Amino acid sequence: MAGGRRNAVDAETKAAAVGEVLSGESVTATAKKYGVTRRAIQYWRAEAGVPSRATLQTNERDYIRRRLVEHTNANLDALAAIAKHVQEPAWLLKQNAHDLAILYGVIFDKLSRLAVAIAGDGPEQPEDGRGAGGSARSVGRLPAPPQAS
């Protein structure tokens, strides 16, 4: 587009350029490759009704968040069912102290980690997935309960 002149670009070329951007190529590199401006690539993408990469990434993050909430709710329901079951005196009497200690430790650890995640101010997790020191001391504090309005 030298000197402000607009060169006609055929639909096939526009589609190829938009496709490259969608497959991960940068708008700048694609514009350079096709000898057009970044604005032209963005216009072609919008003209074709294709959302921007940022919009796609936001949609993907929203989808993942929804799935995480669904998964968390299902796990909380399962944990509630397990907690109810392990309170049965007849069941408890059949268990040895070692197995009960492990069960309690696992449940407590998972709840502690969930509390830290909900609070959003917990300690950084090392690569091995254990909290600072790997103990209940790394739990952090629980969020304040919501205020009634």
Image: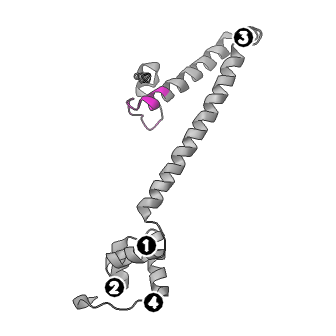
From what the image shows, is residue 107 above or below residue 43? above
* Magenta-colored span: 115-128
From what the image shows, is residue 58 above or below residue 36? above
**First along the sequence among labels 1 and 4:** 4
Q: Residues within 10 Å of mark 1 (few under 14, many from 20)?
A: few
Q: What residue sits right under mark 2 in the picture? A: 35
Q: Nearer the viewer, residue 79 or 94?
A: 79
Q: Residue at x 55, y 20 (%)?
A: 108
**First along the sequence among labels 4 and 2:** 4
**First along the sequence among labels 3 and 1:** 1
Mark 1 is on which residue type?
Ala
Q: Residue at x 45, y 76 (%)?
A: 47
Q: What residue sits right under mark 3 in the picture? A: 92
Q: What residue sits right under mark 1 in the picture? A: 46
Mark 3 is on which residue type?
Leu
Q: Are marks 3 and 1 in contact (CB under 8 Å)?
A: no
Q: CA distance from mark 1 to mark 2?
A: 19 Å
Q: What residue sits right under mark 4 in the picture? A: 10
- What secondary structure prevails in the magenta region? loop
Q: Residues within 10 Å of mark 2 (few under 14, many from 20)?
A: few
Q: CA distance from mark 1 to mark 4?
A: 16 Å
Q: Nearer the viewer, mark 4 or mark 2?
A: 4
Q: Secondary structure at mark 2?
A: loop
The image's mark for residue 130 is none
Q: Count numbered badges in the picture.
A: 4
Q: Secondary structure at mark 3?
A: helix
Q: Secondary structure at mark 4?
A: loop
Q: CA distance from mark 3 to mark 1?
A: 63 Å
Q: CA distance from mark 4 to mark 3?
A: 75 Å
